[in-house]
Image (spheres, rainbow, N blue to C red):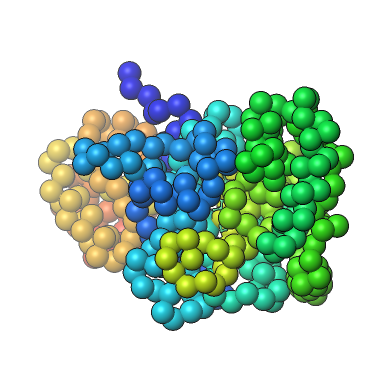
Amino acid sequence: MFRPIRGMKDLYGSDINKYNFIIEQARHIGEKYGYSQISTPIVEQTDVFQRSIGDETDVVSKEMYSFVDKGGESITLRPEGTAGVMRAIVSESMAQSLPIKLMYYGEMFRYDRPQKGRYRQFHQLGFEHIGDKSPYTDALLISMASEILNSIGIFGFKVLINSLGDDETRESYTKGLVKYLSRHEENLSEDSKKRLTKNPLRILDSKDSKDKEICSMAPIITDYLSKESGQYFEKVCALLDDYGVNFEIDNFLVRGLDYYSETAFEFKSTSEEYGDSVGGGGRYDKLLKIFGGPDVSGIGFAFGIERLMMLLDDSKFQNKAKKVAVVPVSEDENDTAFQLLKTLYDADIPAEFIHNGNLSKKMKIADRMNCGIALILGEDECENETVTVKLMNCDDKSKKTQTVARNDIASFLKHSL
Ligand code: HAM
């Protein structure tokens, strides 16, 4: 038997209902804040991700699904959405009218070790606001993300926030960090030893337990913030306070992708079901320029949709639509029942045509398909142009079945559904 590829899963039933609900809420709120939708291809040239996310990140160095296509070009299944959106802004000449606010959702791919909340194919819901650098923009984006979480019924979360500063900040911080880490070099993991010269900031993001222990005593970037970056960060925090956003400063938050500067943040769930990051983002100053666009800054974030889905209650997302089953007693009534079905569809009444097996099997199928009402058509009903209406899960015998004229059935159902 074929199975889905490891780390990939089929979405159906309550899961797909949750997925659609999350997207609907996010689109509604995104529109309110002025975001329009974009959908970019799932594959891009490998360089699109390599240049923007950074060679030394786990995503690029270990997790990308890259392959050479039949034309000899190296292409990659997107591991995240931001790089493709930046590429699109430049290749579609959208940067001529800045600022620009875009939202997107869809499949992402990372060849990571599958575990709870971590898949090889997953979905992200992301927002990018480009060409408007100010603490107000940052605070609004974070506040909008919190509003989306609340609107889908996730209240147990906190926003962790940090500043990665400007170029000046990161240059002096990197020196301080390397000085500290060099003293512990022999105890660092092999990956981190390599990163010590190539990209020391990435060491702070290491999942290795020894690296983590060493990093817990490392100098913090906030102590190195330039004057401008320090004031910028303070203002963002003050504005979040004003909007009542529940945030905490996390001095060690560096995020796993190389393109961030200034404000960086993550949404951490406080639930026992899944207590890890459900989303994250930050400001990026150079991304658009990397793709040949103007030298303007942007900020964005993405939620992991599966991680949000895990926090929603299954029972609230079962298919509960009230449907009507049209049930002919025997084959002789099939054509009349088929006509009745059209009358229902024309009146916008959700209905199923159930015509296989004997009557008791048909009623069982109707029940399984979540039909609340069955319209039974036998010989008598056809002759008298009536329908027997049966309420499926009703114990009150007087209400359980009744006869209704076929011509009146649509208006009768509109009142009882
Ligand atoms: P990220 O933190 O790499 O950021 O991913 C964002 C979210 O995607 C994570 O917080 C998590 O919820 C979800 N996610 C990541 N990997 C997996 C996985 N293997 N399985 C399930 N969920 C996962 C970005 O991707 C940036 N592009 C966000 C951004 C937008 N920054 C600026 N604009």
Side of 395 relative to 140 (left or right)? left
Question: Which of the pair 189/353 is nearer the observer?
Answer: 189
Which residue is drawn at the image coordinates 31% and 31% (left, top)?
Answer: 361
Specify the quadrant of the image occupied by residue 32.
bottom right
Tell me if residue 409 comes above or below residue 4 in the rendering: below
- Quarter occupied by the C terminus: bottom left
The residue at the far top in this view is: 1
Where residue 66 sits: x, y (%)?
Answer: 38, 37
Which residue is drawn at the image coordinates 69% and 53% (left, top)?
Answer: 266
Side of 124 relative to 204 (left or right)? left
Tell me if residue 6 comes above or below residue 110 in the rendering: above
Where residue 160 sits: x, y (%)?
Answer: 75, 54
Specify the quadrant of the image occupied by residue 405.
bottom left
Which residue is drawn at the image coordinates 46% and 38% (left, top)?
Answer: 64
Question: Which of the pair 86/227 is nearer the observer?
Answer: 227
Res 205 seen here:
no
Where residue 302 sits: x, y (%)?
Answer: 56, 55
Where residue 60 sits: x, y (%)?
Answer: 51, 40
Question: Which of the pair 280/106 is nearer the observer?
Answer: 280
Which residue is drawn at the image coordinates 69% and 37% (left, top)?
Answer: 196
Side of 245 relative to 199 (left or right)? right
- Quarter occupied by the N terminus: top left
Res 281 seen here:
yes
Tell me if residue 378 comes above or below residue 412 in the rendering: above
